[in-house]
Image (cartoon, rainbow, N blue to C red):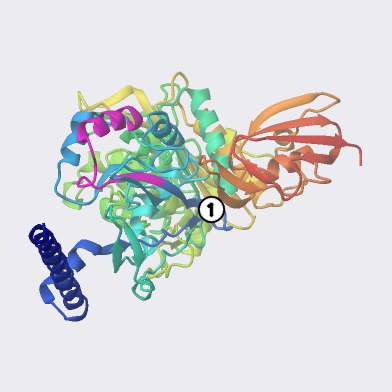
């Protein structure tokens, strides 16, 4: 018995000594690992817990000329995974396919990758977040199943939707510019990325970041455009209305300060909303600079500039051949068979837009003088507005100008130009003869020196001739705006049929380029409507649109008229003890940001004492429901001044007699 007891005691003692020895060994090893440097272990630890993380700065905002935000950033969730930590990969893939609408067959290979980070879906919508909860991928506290996590990202947002979309452009899912100013100024807008060391948690997610290194991140710059958002909005409304009225396929309006080259508005229809992906390429194209066309009769002003610069006078005569002329076996005729002009002075050639008169004048001016003048006005070269996609247009090589080619170019056929090139040419006529570079960015250095291309005298003569176009017997009478002296030129250009290679008899581009005279600032306006249906002459389509755009410009810049109230009837609001509902698009509100659901928000301004017309003038740019009740001026408003206002909200206004 004693022997057995001693054996048990011996065994227990031996076992205890073994445990003590093992503990001592483990303790010794841990002390060694903790206190004694080991390069191999250090590398393993760094690999497991440390990582390099790229910190992207916030992309700079794009503002209009008055500081109105046109492109901003909002915070949004994206879904990522650590494939090494995802349990039951097939089940996880199946659940995610229901929640984020990505086929499970595409998710399973991602979960099979031997890496610690993969994207599942970028920029989750509120609907996506709701589905994650519905399918129990995320609980009510926001925790996700093992191996998944949400990454906070910055998403580009455009508070005014399609406003000036072709100028502003767009970005991809990584907030890299792909069009417009977003692409042109991408380097300035995106800032400087910094690579910093971060400590990962058990799921491989970055936690603690080297703050000192993070200071090297350079935030993106703010870019201020020359575009006036209020003017741009009004222009887009008028352009859309004209397209509907004329049945046109598309259209363009450009407004430029002729002295500085600043583009104040540039609108193309159809347009697109950069907040929504997938718009057709045809809608995204900036037709003002990417599409070439034959200008038709608007080019006759440049022909007159060549003639006047080479000794001709406005009252010099041209025999217009009673409507037809044959050159090298081809007949050139007037736009309408009833037009059988005889003797015309060159001012009248422009006024009545005689094709025969322009053809004969081109032959008399000569190919060398006319070619040089076209080049001087910048045709055949980019305007250097520095927006992506701009083309140079095309002037036929001087050596290939037989009489027929020269005659055709005289009235605007056989040459390819852009809409912006045409506007710049007319701006030079308006500003006294200086060719300026169109500019879209405020404050950028103008490395291009203004170049005089025609004399002040020739400029004045051309303005005189262009003013006659909108007067009695001119083709542009419908461009006249009461109370203003208006000058400009109509152009109805035949489009080339791509199948036959000949000029179409049913497809036209109608345009008008002009300006108000004797007012400041000296603003040049271009309008065009592509393929209007039914009546297609520019005198009946583009000229009326020009008048409406000039009306908008005159109102926006308070251009003095001869005592005439400009367009007041358009802004009047019917009230009289009844409620009127309408949709308006606000623009002069103070930008606040976005709600958790992604709705853009502003601070409500004070409307007290304003007339209904002044309320509509003040609130321009995004859609609100506007409700008036009563008569007089604003007595009460809901929401009140200073309250948060989100897009789609209703604004209620109570009017009362002052």
Q: Is residue 518 left or right of residue 525?
A: right
Image quadrant of residue 568? top right
What residue is drawn where x is 55% and y is 58%?
A: 65
Query: Is 478 rendered above or below residue 54?
Result: above
Task: State which quarter of the image contains the C terminus.
Answer: top right
Residue 606 in the image: state x and y as whole percent: 76, 49
Residue 646 in the image: state x and y as whole percent: 61, 41
Name the one closer to the observer, 443 or 117: 117
What residue is drawn where x is 41% and y is 21%?
A: 337
Residue 549 in the image: state x and y as whole percent: 57, 40
What residue is drawn where x is 49% and y is 35%?
A: 352
Q: Which residues are magenta?
A: 77-100
Query: Is 219 rendered above or below residue 344?
Result: below
Residue at the top extreme of this rendering: 534
Query: Is 80 rendered above or below residue 651?
Result: below
Residue at the spot of label 1: 69
Residue at the right extreme of this rendering: 658
How many labels sit on residues?
Answer: 1
- Label 1 environment density (alpha carbons within 10 Å; few <14, some 14–19, many ≥20): many
Is residue 563 rendered magenta in the image?
no
Is residue 95 rendered magenta in the image?
yes
Q: Is residue 563 visible?
A: yes
Q: Is residue 241 left or right of residue 171?
A: right
The residue tagged with tag 1: helix, strand or loop?
strand
């Amino acid at each position: 018995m004693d022997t057995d007891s001693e054996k048990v005691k011996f065994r227990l003692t031996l076992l205890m000594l073994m445990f003590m020895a093992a503990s001592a060994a483990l303790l010794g090893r841990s002390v060694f690992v903790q206190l004694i440097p080991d390069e191999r272990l250090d590398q393993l630890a760094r690999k497991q817990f440390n990582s390099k993380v790229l910190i992207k700065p916030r992309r700079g905002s794009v503002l209009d000329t008055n500081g109105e935000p046109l492109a901003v950033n909002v915070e949004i969730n994206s879904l990522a995974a650590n494939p090494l930590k995802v349990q039951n990969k097939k089940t996880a893939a199946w659940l995610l396919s229901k929640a984020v609408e990505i086929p499970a067959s595409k998710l399973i290979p991602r979960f099979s990758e031997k890496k610690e980070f993969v994207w599942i879906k970028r920029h989750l919508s509120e609907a996506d977040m709701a589905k994650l909860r519905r399918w129990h991928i995320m609980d009510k506290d926001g925790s996700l199943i093992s191996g998944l996590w949400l990454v906070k990202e910055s998403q580009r947002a455009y508070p005014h939707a399609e406003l000036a979309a072709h100028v502003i452009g767009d970005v991809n899912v990584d907030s890299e510019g792909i069009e417009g100013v977003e692409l042109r100024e991408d380097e300035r807008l995106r800032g400087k990325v910094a690579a910093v060391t971060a400590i990962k948690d058990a799921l491989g997610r970055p936690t603690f970041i080297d703050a000192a290194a993070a200071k090297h991140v350079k935030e993106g710059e703010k870019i201020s455009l020359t575009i006036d958002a209020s003017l741009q909005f009004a222009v887009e409304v008028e352009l859309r209305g004209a397209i509907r009225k004329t049945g046109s396929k598309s259209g363009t309006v450009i407004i430029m300060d002729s002295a500085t080259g600043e583009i104040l508005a540039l609108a193309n229809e159809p347009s697109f909303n950069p907040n929504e992906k997938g718009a057709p390429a045809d809608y995204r194209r900036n037709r003002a600079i990417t599409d070439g066309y034959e200008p038709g009769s608007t080019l006759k002003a440049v022909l007159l500039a060549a003639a006047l610069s080479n000794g001709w006078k406005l009252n010099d005569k041209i025999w217009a051949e009673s409507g037809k002329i044959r050159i090298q076996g081809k007949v050139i005729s007037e736009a309408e068979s009833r037009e059988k002009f005889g003797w015309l002075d060159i001012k009248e050639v422009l006024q009545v837009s005689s094709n025969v008169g322009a053809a004969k004048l081109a032959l008399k001016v000569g190919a060398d003088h006319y070619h040089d003048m076209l080049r001087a006005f910048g045709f055949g070269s980019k305007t250097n507005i520095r927006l992506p996609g701009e083309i140079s247009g095309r002037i036929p090589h001087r050596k290939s100008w037989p009489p027929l080619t020269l005659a055709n170019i005289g009235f605007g056929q056989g040459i390819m130009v852009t809409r912006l090139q045409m506007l710049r040419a007319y701006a030079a006529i308006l500003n006294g003869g200086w060719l300026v570079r169109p500019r879209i960015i405020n404050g950028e250095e103008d490395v291009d020196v203004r170049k005089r291309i025609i004399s002040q005298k020739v400029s004045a003569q051309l303005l005189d001739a262009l003013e006659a176009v909108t007067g009695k017997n001119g083709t542009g009478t419908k461009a006249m705006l009461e109370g203003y002296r208006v000058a400009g030129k109509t152009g109805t250009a035949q489009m080339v049929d791509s199948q036959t290679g000949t000029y179409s008899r049913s497809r036209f581009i109608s345009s008008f380029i002009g300006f108000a005279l004797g007012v400041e600032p000296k603003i040049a306006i271009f309008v065009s409507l592509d393929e209007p249906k039914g009546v297609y002459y520019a005198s009946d389509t583009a000229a009326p649109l020009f008048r409406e755009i000039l009306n908008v410009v005159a109102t926006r810049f308070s251009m003095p008229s001869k005592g005439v109230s400009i367009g007041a009837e358009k802004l009047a609001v019917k009230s009289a003890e009844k409620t009127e509902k309408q949709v308006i698009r606000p623009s002069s509100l103070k930008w606040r940001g976005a709600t958790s659901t992604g709705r853009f928000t502003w601070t409500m301004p004070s409307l007290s004492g304003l007339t209904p017309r002044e309320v509509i003038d003040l609130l321009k740019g995004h859609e609100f429901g506007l409700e008036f009740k009563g008569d007089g001026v604003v007595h009460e408003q809901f929401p009140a001044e200073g309250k948060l206002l989100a897009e789609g909200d209703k604004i209620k206004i109570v009017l009362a007699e002052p």
